Amino acid sequence: MSTGDGATSGATPARGTTPASEAGSAARTASGVATATATGAASDVGAATAAGAASAAGTGGATTATLGRRTPGLVPVTETMRTSERHPPEPPPSSSSDGDRERDAAPRGATRAVWAFWRLLGSELRLTFRRPRNLAMLAVLALVPVVVGVALRIAGGSGGPGDEMGGIIADVAGNSLMLTFVSFSFLVLLLMPVAVSVVAGDSIAGEAGGGTLRYLLAAPAGRTRLLVVKYLNAVVYAYAVTAVVALSALVTGVVLFPAGDVTLLSGTTISFAEGLVRIAIAVGYVGAGMAALAAIALAVSTFTEVPIGAIAGTLVLVIVCQVLRAIPDLDVIAPYLLPTWFTNFDAVLRSPIDTGALGEGLLAFGAYIALFGSIAWARFSGKDITS
Amino acid sequence: MTVVTQEAGAPFGAAPPSGDSAIVTAGLTKRFRGGQIAVDTLDLAVPRGSVFGFLGPNGSGKTTTIRMLLGLVSPTEGEYSVLGLPQAQALPKVGALVEGPAFYPYLSGAANLTRFDAADPTARGGTAKRRIAEALERVGLSAAAGKRYRNYSLGMRQRLSIAAALLGPRELLILDEPTNGLDPQGTREVRTLVKEIAADGTTVFVSSHLLAEVEQMCTHAAIMRTGKLVAQGTIASLSSGLVTRIRVETPDADDAARVLTETGLADVRAEGREVTAELGGHAPERVNAALVGKGVAVRGLAVVRPSLEDVFVGLTGEGFDVDG
C-alpha cells in the first residue's frame, strides 16, 4: 500500500505547486479548465525562475539539505548552473527571439541548413571510416592487388607464355599500369560488391537494429535528409574502395614491373601519363557501378532491422545476377543485370576510348540509382519506426 | 499550427487551441498492421510548464503515443500538436528518451552525443563541445565522457540518454521510463533532475508504470489503459473524486468508533486496533479533541489522502505493478 498519511505526503513539492482551486474539478472534464489554470501555475514558475539567483540559491540550498549527503551521480541544483545561466551567448530559443529569427531566416536559414547537412555527412563519414570493420575491408581489398602482382611476377619469371594465362602475364609483365585493370577485373565482380554492400546495407538497418535510428529521427535528422546523407556516405565509401584497389595496384605495379609506355588491347601504344588518365577514368566508372550497387543495398536496408539481412540480400542479388549471366540462353536479360556493366571499364583500354560502352554503362548505373533510390525513399519516408 | 499525421501546418478544427499547451492530441489513434489497436482515440492535453506523468501498465500504449509525438510512427487517425509548431520546428526544442538508451557501442559517451547533436539541423557545430560537456556534467558523466559506451553500466547508459535529451535548450522533455534500470539512488537523482529542469520552465512529459514515482515528481498526470485514456488532470484533481479518511490507532477501538459516529463522521470502520472514517468537512484536531474528551486513548491519528494508486484502482477496478 502506498497510501501515505497526510502529515508527510501532503507536503511534497509537487503538490505544493498545484493551485488549490483545481482540486474541485472532476478529472474527465478537467482538460480545458486544467489547461487554463495550470498555465497560470506555469507562468508563476517562470516568474519565479526569472526572479533571480537569490531565490534559486534558496531552493537549491533546501534541495541539498534534504538530500543530506553528496552523491557521485546527478549533481544537485546548487552545483550546476541553471539553463538560463549556461547559455548566455546564445539567443533564447523560444518566445522573444522567434520573430527576429524568422524575419531574416531566408538567407541565414538556408546557409545554416547547408552547414548542418555537411555536419551530418561529416559525422556519417567519420563513423564509417573509423569503424574497424570498414577499414579492415579496405585493407583486404588493398592486399589483393599486391598478392596478384607478386603471383604474376613469380609466374612471369618462371614460366614462359603459352597458355591462356600467358596473355595476362605478358600484359602485366610488360607494363606496371596493367596490374590495375587486372585487379579490377578480379575484384569488381564479387569482393568490391561485398565491401560496398556491407556499408550500404548496414546504413539504415544497422541504425534501426541498434535503436539509434529513433534518436537520429527524433533529433530530428529528417527522413529524406538522413537517407540522402546515408547514400552519399555509401557512395564515398564505394569510391574509396575503388580508389584503394587502384592505388594499391598502381604502387605494386610500379614496384614490381617496368614503367613506361602502355600497349593497349587494340595494339596501339600510349604514354605512361596518358595511362594514368585512363586509370582515373576507369576508377570513375567502376566507382559509379559500385554506387549503383550501393543504391540497391540502401533500398534493401530500409526494409529490415537486421543489417546482416540487408547485406546478405544484396549479395544474393549480385550472385544470382552472375549466375544468370553465365547461362548462354539468358543472354537477352543480361543487359538488364547490373553486374553485366561492371566490367565495361576495359573500354578505356581501347584506342580511342570506347565512350559508347562507358556511356551505356553509366546510363544503366543511373537507371539503377534512380529506381532503387526511389524505392528506398518511398519505403523510408513512410515507415513506422518501431525499433 | 498543428501537425496532422505527417503534414505540417494544417489547421486543427475543433480541437482546443494549443497556444498554452506543450502537447495536444485529438482523437489520436494507432492501429498496427494486423489490426492491433495500440492507441485508441487519445485526447491528451499537457499544459506548458507542467511535469506531466503519463501512467499505465506495460503495453498500454504509452510508448506508441510518444513515438507518434516524435514523428517516428504515423497515426492511423487523429491529430497532434507538439509545442504548437510544425514537426520539423518543434522537434529541435524537444529532448527525448524513448524506450531506453540506444547508442553506438564502439564510440565514447562524448562521441555518441556529438553524433546525435550533428543530426539536429538547428544545433550549431561551434558550440557542440561546450553543450556536450555541460550535458555530461549535468548527469554526472563527465568522468566517463571518454569511455566507450560498450563499457558503460546500465545506469550510466540511462544517464547518457538523459544527457542526449539535454543537449540543447529544450522547451519540452519527453522521458519514457527514465528510471528504468536505475538503482534507488539513481532514481532519486533523476527525480531531482526532473524537478530542476521543470524549475527552469521546461515542460516535462514522463511516462512510467511506477505510480509512486509519478506521484512524487509530477504536477499533472494521465492514466492509460489498453490504449485508452482513463483520466487526466492535476494530481490533486485526479484524487479529488476520492474521499479523504481519518485513521485512529487506539486500544479502545469500539469506543473510538462510537465517538466518531457521534461526532458525525460517515463510513466508520473498525479493524482491530485501527478505526477509520471519512473525514468529510471535519477538522482532524477537533476529532482528536472529541476522542480524547470521551476518554479514548489515542495512540496515533492520521489523515489519509487518496493516492494515485487508489485513483487508478477506483477508475479501472484493477491494480497494476505498483513498485515494478
Image: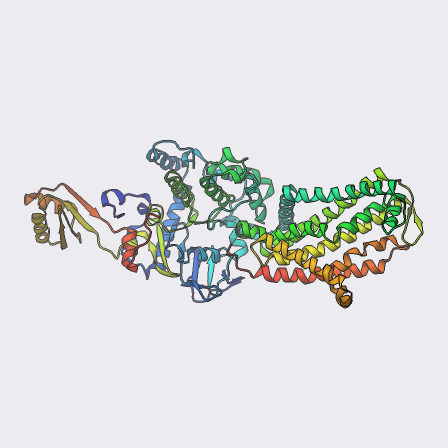
How is this picture coloured? Answer: rainbow
Q: Is residue B114 above or below residue B281?
A: above
Q: Give the percent coordinates (x, y) of residue B137.
A: 48, 36
Q: Could one spot residue A262 in this view of the protein?
A: yes
Whether residue A215 is visible, yes or no, is no
Quarter residue A35 falls in: bottom left
B198 lies above or below B36:
above
The quarter holding residue A372 reads: bottom right
Please state if A340 lies on the left or on the right of B165 as rendered. right
Give left or right: position of A93 versus A279. Answer: left
Residue A215: horizontal and vertical position, in percent? 53, 50
The correct choice, above or below, for B159 with respect to A34 in the image is above
| Residue found at x 29% / y 58% | B318
Q: Is residue B20 left or right of residue B273?
A: right
View extreme (right): residue: A268
The structure residue drawn at horizontal position 65% and vertical position 57%, both measured from the top left corner, is A314
Q: Residue A336 at x, y = what percent?
A: 74, 64
**Percent of width and height locating residue A369:** 70, 59
In this rendering, position of residue B230 left or right of residue A275: left
Which sits in the foreground, B21 or B100? B100
Residue in the foreground of this view, choosing between A384 and A181: A181
Q: Relative to A208, is B106 above or below?
A: above
Task: Residue lying at the far left in this picture: please name it.
Answer: B294
